Image (spheres, rainbow, N blue to C red):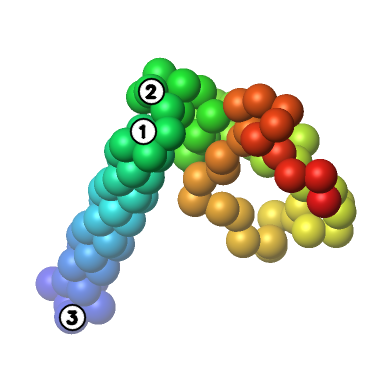
């Protein structure tokens, strides 16, 4: 086995580990944020209805509905890890 062909499986394993680590850290960030939010203000059920993470099926549609300037809604634009939407109209500031 050549040196080059032996390094390919090692590289794939490394990429897989990095990807799984990023998923774990993303979920823990989401869970930590929900825990903090519920301890400060709302029940867990209410908080989970207004907080969207990338793995949520509604994430893209929620993101698109809140982006005001379409120039920033491109595939190259960095996306947020989570989106928090207002529960009541009074939760949104009148900017």
Q: CA distance from mark 3 to mark 2?
A: 56 Å
Q: Which residue is label 3 attached to?
A: 3
Dots 3 and 1: beta carbons under 8 Å? Answer: no
Horizontal and vertical percent for residue 71?
85, 58
Q: Earlier in the sequence, mark 3 or mark 2?
A: 3
Occupied quadrant, residue 22? bottom left
Label 2 neighbour load within 10 Å: few <14, some 14-19, many 20+: few
Residue 76 point in image, percent of width and height: 68, 62
Q: Which mark is residue 38?
A: 1
Mark 2: secondary structure = loop
Report the mark closest to the observer, 3 or 1: 1
Of label 2 and label 1, which has the lower sequence position? 1
Label 3: element kind: helix
Q: Which mark is residue 43?
A: 2
Kindly indicate the quadrant of the structure image that contains residue 30. Answer: top left
Residue 84 placement, left or right of 17? right
Q: Is residue 4 above or below residue 57?
A: below
Do the residues bearing badges 3 and 2 touch, measured as CB atoms within 8 Å? no
Is residue 23 something one can see in this rendering? no
Residues marked 2 and 1 touching at CB (< 8 Å): yes
Q: Residue 47: x, y in percent?
A: 45, 28
Instruction: Answer few, some or many: residues within 10 Å of disc 1's Cα (few below 14, many 20 plus, some between 14 and 19).
Output: some
Question: Residue 3: x percent and y percent?
Answer: 18, 80
Taking depth in this image into account, of 78 and 6 the one nearest to the observer is 78
Q: Nearer the viewer, residue 68 or 58?
A: 68
- Between residue 51 and residue 41, name the one nearer to us: 41
Residue at position x 51%, y 45% in the image: 82
Image quadrant holding the N terminus, namely: bottom left
């Amino acid at each position: 086995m050549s040196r080059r062909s032996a390094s390919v499986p090692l590289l794939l394993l490394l990429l897989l580990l990095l990807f799984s680590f990023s998923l774990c850290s993303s979920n823990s960030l989401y869970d930590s944020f929900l825990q903090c939010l519920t301890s400060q203000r709302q029940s867990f059920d209410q908080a989970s209805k207004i907080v969207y993470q990338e793995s949520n099926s509604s994430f893209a549609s929620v993101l698109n509905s809140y982006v005001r300037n379409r120039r920033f809604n491109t595939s190259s634009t960095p996306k947020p890890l989570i989106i928090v939407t207002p529960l009541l109209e009074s939760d949104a500031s009148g900017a």
